[in-house]
Image (tube, grey):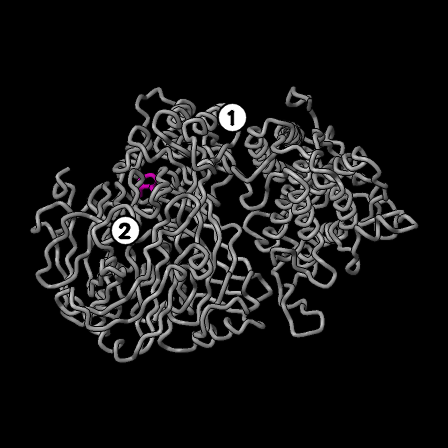
C-alpha cells in the first residue's frame, strides 16, 4: 500500500515560501474576528503598512510584502523504483517537477496549521513523459518536526514538515508514459480497482530566511530599509525538499501518511522523528524522510550508527523478531537525497509474519528505542476545516490499525488538549473504519482538536505534532450586520472600510493586481472579483482573499456593491445554532 | 531566423561592446512579446498566455544574466530602449539577410510568426567556438546562438584577474528563484550563456532546453500551429499533435504598432491611458538601470513598475480610440518627462 509500494518516483529540489507575515501578530490582526487591526479610526492603509514595515525590526516580521506563493524550483525526478531497487535509468529521471501553491496558515498566529492551496502538480513536461495531476484536496502540514536540525534554529529553520495530497484517477489525473517504463507501470497500476489514484508526499526542511543562515539582525535592517524605499519587496524563505509519488489505495487517507506509524520517543534535540513503514511478506520499507536529524545547516545527517527494525512483544521490550539492520550509509545525506529518505530492507518471511501483528520498533545498536509503533491512528480526511458561523459539516476520520482500516466499533475521541476529559466527544468507527463528528460553526474562533483512538484511552496530556493526529477548525464570524443593507448600505465607503481595506492594508502585493482603494477599478473588475471570491472556488490557487478569511457578511456587502443598484443577493445569515458537541470557546477557558 | 552582424573580438572592450548589445537585444524582445500577451482577453487562451509569459520571464532572466556578466568584467551595463516598429539592436537581419523590423502586434498568428523568427534555432550542431576562432574566412552574419557561443569562447580566454567578484550582481534572493545567479568568474559566465542559448533556441535536433523544458522557438510554435509538441516514436523523436486550444478571436481589437499612431486625434481618455503606460514603462527602465548598476534594492521597484505597466495596459486596452472599435496597448515609449527622472 501507499507511496512506499512500488512503482514510485523520487524527486528532490527546493521550494520558496513567500507568505505575508504581518498577520502573524496580534498587533496587526485579530484572528478570531478575521480583521486587520486598525487601532484608531484615523489609521489608514498607508499608516498600517508603515507599521507592518516597522515590525520587521520590532517583531521579527520577515516578509510584509509576501505573496503567499510557494513554488518549487530546481526540482526534478532523481530516481525510480519499480521493485528492483532505486534506479536512475528511466527517461522520467531528470525531468522537472512543477508545483506552485499558496501557503496559508489557517491559524495565522500559530505554527501548526499551514496549508498549500494549489491547482495542479506536474512531473515531467507537457508533450513528453509526464504525470499531470489536478488538485482535489489541498496539502496540510503534518508531523511537523521541531527538532529536525540540531544547531540551525532560525525561526522555522529548525523544523521539517510532511506534505501530502492524493489525486483521484477519476479527476483528470493523466499519465503520459511514452518511453518511461516506470510511468507505464504506474499507468497499469491505476487500472486496479483497489488503486484510487496517486499520492504525493514530500518533506520540506532547512528553511533559510534572507537566503542566509546568519546575521539576521543586519539582514532585517536591510530589508526594512528596502521596504521603506518603496516598490515591491518580497523576501521569500527557501527550503530543501525530497519527495515521492506513488500509488494511493483504498483505505488510505489522502492528506496524511496512513501506513504503520512508528512514533518518536520522548522528543528533544537529536531525537529521531516519527516515521511510517510498510511491511509485506518479505520486505520492510521505512519512510524516514522526516526523521533523521541534521547536525547543522550543511545538512550532514546525525550518525546514529547501525539501526535495527524489530518486532516486540506486548511488553514493548521483548524482541520477538528482527526485521533488518541498516547502517549510516543508508541514511547519510547523499543517500537521503537520492532516495527521499526511503529505506528498504529484505525481511525473513518468518520474521515478517510475526511482525504483522506485533509492534515494530527502530533501535540503535545499544538497544535504545528511537521509534516505537502505535497501532491505532485516527486520521482526518480533511485536517483543516473552515466554517462560516451558522454552518455545519461532518468531520470524517479514518481509523487505521497497523496501516489498514480499523474494524467497526473502535472508539475515537475528539478532544481539545489541556481541558477536562469530559469536554471531549467520542464517536465509533463503521465497517470501513470511519468515525464521524458533526461540526457546527458558532462564532468567530480558531480551535485545535486532537484525535485519540481506542477504548478507554486516556486523553493526551498535550498537543504534540509528532505523537498526536489533529484537526484545525476556523469559524469565520457571520458579520450579519454587513449583509443587511438596512444596517450597512452597499456604498463604496462601507465596502472599503469593512471589506477591502483589510486586505489592502495587509497585502501590499495586491497593488500588483488591483488597487483596492480605487472604486472604479474595483467596479471594473466586478466579474473577475465575483469569480475569485466565490465560495465554490475556495480551494483554487487564485481564490481571494488568499488567506481565506472573508466572512459571509463581507462577501454579501462586496457583491451588493459590485452588482450596483441590484438588491442584495444574499440575505442575512440566520443566527448561529448551538451545538451539543461543539467544543466552545468556554471549554478552552478563553 | 535572425542574424547579427559579425564583429570580431580582439580585446576586452570588444567583448564588452557585444555584451552591451546582448543586453539591449534581450530587453528589446520583451515589448513585442508583452504586447501580444496583454492583448489576450482575460480568462481566455490560458495555454498560450502561459507560454508567452514564461518566455518573457526568461528573457528578463537572460537580460539579468548578461548584466551580471558585464558587471563581473568591471563595466556598468547600459539599458537602451528601441522604438517600435524598428530594427532590433546589433544590425539584426532576417533569414534572407534583409533588415528585420520588429512590430508590436496583438496576439495573432503574425505575432507568433514574428516571435518564432526571433527565436529560431541555428541549423545543425556547430562547434562554434572553434570554428569561429580558427576559421580563415570570417562570417558576415551569425545567429543569436552563434553570437553567444562566440562570446563565450572569448570569455574563456580571459585570465581570472579580469573578473571581479560580487560587483553589482543580481541573484535570486527576491525574484526568479533558481533562475538568476551571480557571475563571479568565467565558469558562472559560461553557465549563464549556456542557459541563455539553450532556453532560447533549444537545438535543431532537440526542442528541449538544458532543463528538459520546451525552448522558446517551439513554445511559440505550439501557439502558432495550435498544437502540442509531443514525444513520438519517429526518427525525430517528436511530433505536432493535439490542440492547444488557441482562440485567435479572444483578443482585444488592438491596433498594431501604437508607437506609430497619432494619439492626438484620439479621445482624452485614450491619451491619458497611453501616458500611464509610458510612465510605467519609463519607470521600469529607470529602476532596472539602477538595479543593475549597484543599487540592487531597486529591483523591487522595477518589478512594481512592471506590474503597473500591466495594469495600465489592461486599462488602455479597454479605452476606445477615435475609431471606436479600436483600442491600443502600450507603445513602450521611454518618456522621462512623465517621471521627471532620467536614466543616469
Residue A573 location, quadrant: top left
Q: Position of residue A264 (x, y in %)?
A: 24, 55
Mark 2 lies on residue: A271
Viewer-side residue, A316 vs A458: A316
**Relative to residue B41, is residue A381 depicted above or below?**
below
What is the magenta range?
Answer: A549-556
Residue, far front: A366
- Pointer 2 and pointer 1 on the same chain: yes
Of badges 2 and 1, the one in the foreground is 2
Asked whether disc 2 touches disc 1, contact meaning CB atoms under 8 Å apart, the reply is: no
B119 left or right of A228?
Answer: right
Q: Earlier in the sequence, mark 2 or mark 1?
A: 1
Residue B256 in sight from this viewpoint:
no
Judged from the image, the secondary structure of the residue bearing numbered disc 1 is loop
**Relative to residue A198, is residue B192 depicted above or below?**
above
Mark 1 lies on residue: A230
Amino acid at each position: 500500500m501507499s507511496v512506499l509500494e512500488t512503482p514510485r518516483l523520487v524527486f528532490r529540489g527546493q521550494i520558496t515560501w513567500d507568505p505575508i507575515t504581518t498577520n502573524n501578530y496580534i498587533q496587526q490582526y485579530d484572528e478570531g474576528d478575521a480583521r486587520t487591526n486598525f487601532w484608531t479610526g484615523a489609521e489608514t492603509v498607508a499608516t498600517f503598512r508603515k507599521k507592518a514595515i516597522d515590525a520587521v525590526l520590532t517583531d521579527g516580521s520577515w516578509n510584509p510584502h509576501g505573496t503567499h506563493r510557494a513554488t518549487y524550483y530546481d526540482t526534478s525526478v532523481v530516481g525510480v523504483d519499480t521493485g528492483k531497487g532505486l534506479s536512475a535509468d528511466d527517461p522520467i529521471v531528470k525531468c522537472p517537477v512543477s508545483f506552485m501553491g499558496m501557503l496559508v496558515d489557517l491559524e495565522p498566529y500559530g505554527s501548526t496549521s499551514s496549508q498549500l492551496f494549489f491547482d495542479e502538480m506536474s512531473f515531467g513536461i507537457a508533450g513528453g513523459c509526464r504525470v499531470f495531476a489536478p488538485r482535489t484536496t489541498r496539502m496540510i502540514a503534518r508531523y511537523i518536526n521541531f527538532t529536525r536540525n540540531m544547531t540551525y534554529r532560525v525561526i522555522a529553520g529548525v523544523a521539517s514538515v510532511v506534505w501530502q495530497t492524493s489525486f483521484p484517477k477519476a479527476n483528470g489525473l493523466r499519465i503520459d508514459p511514452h518511453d518511461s517504463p516506470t510511468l507505464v507501470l504506474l499507468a497499469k497500476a491505476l487500472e486496479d480497482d483497489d488503486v484510487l489514484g496517486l499520492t504525493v508526499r514530500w518533506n520540506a526542511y532547512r528553511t533559510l530566511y534572507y537566503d542566509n543562515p546568519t546575521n539576521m539582525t543586519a539582514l532585517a535592517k536591510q530589508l526594512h530599509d528596502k521596504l521603506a524605499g518603496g516598490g515591491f519587496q518580497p523576501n521569500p524563505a527557501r527550503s530543501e525538499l525530497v519527495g515521492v509519488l506513488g500509488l494511493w489505495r483504498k483505505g488510505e487517507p489522502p492528506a496524511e501518511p496512513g501506513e504503520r506509524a512508528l512514533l518518536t520517543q520522548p522528543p528533544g534535540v537529536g531525537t529521531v522523528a516519527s516515521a511510517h513503514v510498510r511491511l509485506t511478506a518479505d520486505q520492510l520499507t521505512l519512510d524516514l524522510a522526516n526523521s533523521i536529524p541534521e547536525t547543522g545547516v550543511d545538512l550532514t545527517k546525525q550518525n546514529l550508527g547501525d539501526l535495527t527494525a524489530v518486532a516486540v512483544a506486548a511488553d514493548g521490550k521483548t524482541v520477538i523478531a528482527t526485521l533488518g539492520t541498516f547502517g549510516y550509509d543508508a541514511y547519510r545525506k547523499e543517500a537521503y537525497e537520492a532516495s527521499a529518505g526511503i529505506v528498504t530492507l529484505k525481511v525473513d518471511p518468518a520474521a515478517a509474519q510475526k511482525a504483522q501483528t506485533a509492534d515494530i520498533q527502530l533501535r540503535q545498536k545499544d538497544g535504545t528505542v528511537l521509534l516505537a509503533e502505535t497501532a491505532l491512528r485516527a486520521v482526518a480526511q480533511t485536517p483543516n476545516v473552515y466554517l462560516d458561523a451558522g454552518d455545519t459539516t461532518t468531520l470524517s476520520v479514518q481509523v487505521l490499525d497497523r496501516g489498514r482500516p480499523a474494524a467497526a466499533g473502535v472508539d475515537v475521541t475528539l478532544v481539545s488538549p489541556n481541558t477536562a476529559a469530559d469536554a471531549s466527544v467520542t464517536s465509533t468507527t463503521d465497517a470501513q473504519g470511519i468515525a464521524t463528528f458533526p461540526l457546527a460553526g458558532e462564532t468567530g474562533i480558531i480551535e485545535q482538536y486532537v484525535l485519540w483512538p481506542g477504548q478507554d484511552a486516556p486523553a493526551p496530556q498535550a498537543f504534540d505534532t509528532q505523537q498526536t493526529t489533529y484537526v484545525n477548525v476556523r469559524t469565520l464570524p457571520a458579520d450579519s450586520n454587513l449583509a443587511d443593507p438596512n444596517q450597512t448600505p452597499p456604498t463604496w465607503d462601507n465596502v472599503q472600510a469593512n471589506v477591502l481595506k483589510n486586505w489592502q492594508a495587509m497585502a501590499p502585493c495586491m497593488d500588483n493586481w488591483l488597487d483596492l482603494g480605487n472604486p472604479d477599478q474595483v467596479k471594473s473588475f466586478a466579474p473577475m472579483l465575483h469569480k475569485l471570491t466565490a465560495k465554490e472556488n475556495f480551494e483554487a490557487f487564485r481564490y481571494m482573499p488568499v488567506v481565506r478569511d472573508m466572512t459571509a457578511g463581507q462577501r454579501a456587502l462586496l457583491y451588493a456593491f459590485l452588482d450596483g443598484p441590484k438588491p442584495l443577493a444574499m440575505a442575512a445569515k440566520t443566527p448561529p445554532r448551538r451545538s451539543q458537541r461543539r467544543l466552545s470557546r468556554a471549554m478552552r477557558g478563553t | 531566423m535572425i542574424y547579427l552582424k559579425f564583429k570580431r573580438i580582439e580585446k576586452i572592450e570588444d567583448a564588452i561592446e557585444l555584451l552591451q548589445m546582448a543586453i539591449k537585444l534581450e530587453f528589446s524582445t520583451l515589448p513585442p512579446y508583452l504586447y501580444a500577451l496583454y492583448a489576450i482577453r482575460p480568462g481566455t487562451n490560458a495555454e498560450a498566455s502561459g507560454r508567452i509569459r514564461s518566455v518573457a520571464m526568461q528573457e528578463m532572466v537572460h537580460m539579468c544574466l548578461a548584466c551580471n556578466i558585464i558587471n563581473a568584467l568591471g563595466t556598468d551595463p547600459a539599458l537602451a530602449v528601441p522604438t517600435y516598429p524598428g530594427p532590433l539592436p546589433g544590425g539584426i537581419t532576417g533569414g534572407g539577410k534583409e533588415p528585420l523590423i520588429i512590430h508590436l502586434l496583438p496576439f495573432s498568428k503574425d505575432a507568433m510568426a514574428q516571435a518564432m523568427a526571433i527565436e529560431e534555432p541555428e541549423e545543425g550542431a556547430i562547434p562554434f567556438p572553434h570554428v569561429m576562432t580558427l576559421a580563415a574566412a570570417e562570417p558576415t552574419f551569425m545567429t543569436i546562438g552563434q553570437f553567444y557561443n562566440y562570446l563565450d569562447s572569448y570569455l574563456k580566454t580571459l585570465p581570472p584577474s579580469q573578473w571581479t567578484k560580487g560587483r553589482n550582481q543580481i541573484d535570486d534572493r527576491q525574484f526568479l528563484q533558481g533562475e538568476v545567479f551571480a557571475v563571479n568568474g568565467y565558469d558562472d559566465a559560461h553557465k549563464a550563456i549556456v542557459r541563455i542559448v539553450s532556453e532560447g533556441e533549444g537545438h535543431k535536433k532537440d526542442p528541449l532546453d538544458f532543463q528538459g523544458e520546451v525552448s522558446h522557438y517551439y513554445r511559440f510554435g505550439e501557439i502558432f500551429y495550435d498544437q502540442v509538441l509531443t514525444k513520438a516514436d519517429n526518427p525525430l523523436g517528436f511530433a505536432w499533435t493535439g490542440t492547444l486550444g488557441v482562440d485567435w478571436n479572444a483578443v482585444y481589437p488592438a491596433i498594431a504598432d501604437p508607437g506609430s499612431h497619432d494619439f492626438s486625434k484620439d479621445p482624452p481618455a485614450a491619451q491619458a491611458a497611453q501616458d500611464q503606460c509610458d510612465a510605467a514603462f519609463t519607470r521600469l527602465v529607470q529602476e532596472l538601470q539602477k538595479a543593475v548598476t549597484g543599487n540592487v534594492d531597486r529591483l523591487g521597484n522595477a518589478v512594481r513598475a512592471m506590474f503597473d505597466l500591466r495594469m495600465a495596459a489592461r486599462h488602455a486596452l479597454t479605452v476606445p480610440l477615435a475609431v471606436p472599435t479600436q483600442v491600443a496597448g502600450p507603445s513602450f515609449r521611454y518618456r522621462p518627462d512623465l517621471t521627471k527622472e532620467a536614466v543616469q
